[in-house]
Image (cartoon, grey):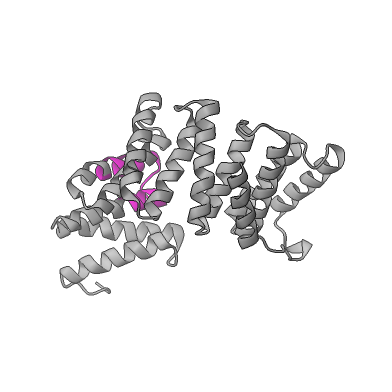
C-alpha cells in the first residue's frame, strides 16, 4: 500500500486543480449531487459510507462531463477515506482504486494507472474471485492500458484469459463478452495477424449491429475496424462501403473532432485515394 499511496499522491499533484466557476453555472444534476454531499457530511460525517458513495457519484458525473481534474481529486479523496475506514480488500476500496486508475489512464498517466489498476485487479481477485465481473472489469481495463502502451503480447495474453472466462460465465451476447471480442480483434490487427482478426471483427460488427443498432458509435467503430482489416488484406472494394459507413456514423454520433471520427476519416480518405475517388464524390 505504500506504493499505492505514492502513486495517488503523484497523481493528485499532477492533475488536481482549484475548481472555480460561479454557482449559477453548475448544472442542476451536479448541484443536486453537491447538496446531497453537504447534507450527508453534516448529518453523517465526511467519511461515512453514504457520504463517500455520494462523493464517488459526483466524481463519475464530473468525469462524464469533462471535468477530469476535479473528478480525479474527488476519486482520490474517496479512495483515501475508504483505505482509512475499510479494509484494503473491501469491494468499495477496490472500486475506488479501479475508478482512479481508469481516470489516470484516460489522462495519459499510464505508469501510475498501471500500478494502481494491477492493485485493484489483484485485490478483486483475492476478495471476489477470478470469475467475478468486477475482477474481469479491472483486467479488461488493464488490457486496454497495456495495448495503449504498445505491450501487445502482454495485452493479448490477458485479453484471451478474460474472454475465456466471460464466455464461460456470461451470455454470448453480453456486452462485456462483446467488449473482449472487440479487444481481441483490435490487438490481433495491431499485431498484424489480419487473418485471425477478421472473424472477430465480423462477429463484433454483427452483434453490435443487432444489440446496439446501426447508428451507435461502437457499431461505427466495429465497421471501421473491419474496414481496416479488409483493406490491409487487399480487399479495398469491400472495405470502402464499411469505411464510408463508419465515417458517417461516427461523425453523426461523436462529431468531427473525436479521435474515433478522425481515425475513420483518415481510413476512408486512404481507401478513396486507392480508387482515385475525390473527396467530394
**What residue is rendered at 60% in x and 31% in y?**
89
**Residue farthest along the front direction in this orientation:** 2
Q: Can residue 46 be seen in this view?
A: yes
Whole-percent x, y for residue 270 in the image:
23, 68
Q: Which residue is nearer to you in this view: 133 or 212?
A: 133
Q: Which residue is nearer to you in this view: 121 or 4?
A: 4
Whole-percent x, y for residue 175 in the image:
42, 37
Q: Is residue 67 visible?
A: no
Magenta residue span? 201-222
Q: Quadrant of the C terminus?
A: bottom left
**What residue is rendered at 68% in x and 51% in y?**
74
Q: State left or right for residue 11 relative to residue 158.
A: right
Q: In this view, does 73 lie above or below 161?
A: below
Main secondary structure of the magenta stretch: helix
Whole-percent x, y for residue 121 in the image:
50, 37
Whole-percent x, y for residue 155 in the image:
35, 45
Q: Quadrant of the N terminus?
A: top right
**What residue is rendered at 83% in x and 39% in y?**
45
Q: Is residue 37 magenta?
A: no
Amino acid at each position: 500500500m505504500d506504493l499505492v499511496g505514492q502513486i495517488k499522491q503523484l497523481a493528485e499533484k499532477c492533475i488536481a486543480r482549484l475548481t472555480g466557476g460561479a454557482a449559477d453555472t453548475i448544472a442542476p444534476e451536479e448541484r443536486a449531487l453537491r447538496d446531497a454531499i453537504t447534507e450527508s457530511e453534516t448529518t453523517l460525517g465526511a467519511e461515512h459510507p453514504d457520504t463517500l458513495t455520494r462523493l464517488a457519484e459526483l466524481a463519475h458525473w464530473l468525469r462524464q462531463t469533462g471535468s477530469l481534474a476535479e473528478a480525479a481529486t474527488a476519486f482520490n479523496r474517496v479512495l483515501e477515506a475508504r483505505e482509512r475506514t475499510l479494509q484494503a480488500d473491501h469491494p468499495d476500496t477496490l472500486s475506488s482504486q479501479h475508478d482512479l486508475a481508469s481516470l489516470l489512464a484516460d489522462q495519459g498517466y499510464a505508469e501510475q494507472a498501471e500500478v494502481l489498476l494491477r492493485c485493484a485487479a489483484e485485490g478483486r481477485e483475492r476478495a471476489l474471485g477470478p470469475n467475478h465481473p468486477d475482477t474481469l472489469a479491472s483486467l479488461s481495463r488493464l488490457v486496454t492500458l497495456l495495448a495503449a502502451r504498445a505491450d501487445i503480447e502482454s495485452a493479448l495474453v490477458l485479453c484471451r484469459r478474460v474472454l475465456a472466462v466471460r464466455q464461460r460465465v456470461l451470455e454470448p451476447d453480453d456486452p462485456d463478452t462483446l467488449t473482449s471480442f472487440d479487444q481481441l480483434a483490435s490487438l490481433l490487427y495491431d499485431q498484424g495477424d489480419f487473418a485471425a482478426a477478421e472473424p472477430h471483427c465480423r462477429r463484433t460488427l454483427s452483434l453490435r449491429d443487432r444489440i446496439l443498432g446501426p447508428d451507435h458509435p461502437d457499431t461505427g467503430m466495429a465497421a471501421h475496424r473491419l474496414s481496416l482489416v479488409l483493406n490491409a488484406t487487399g480487399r479495398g472494394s469491400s472495405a470502402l462501403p464499411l469505411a464510408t459507413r463508419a465515417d458517417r456514423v461516427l461523425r453523426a454520433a461523436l462529431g468531427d473532432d473525436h479521435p474515433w471520427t478522425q481515425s475513420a476519416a483518415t481510413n476512408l480518405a486512404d481507401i478513396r485515394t486507392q480508387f482515385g475517388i475525390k473527396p467530394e464524390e
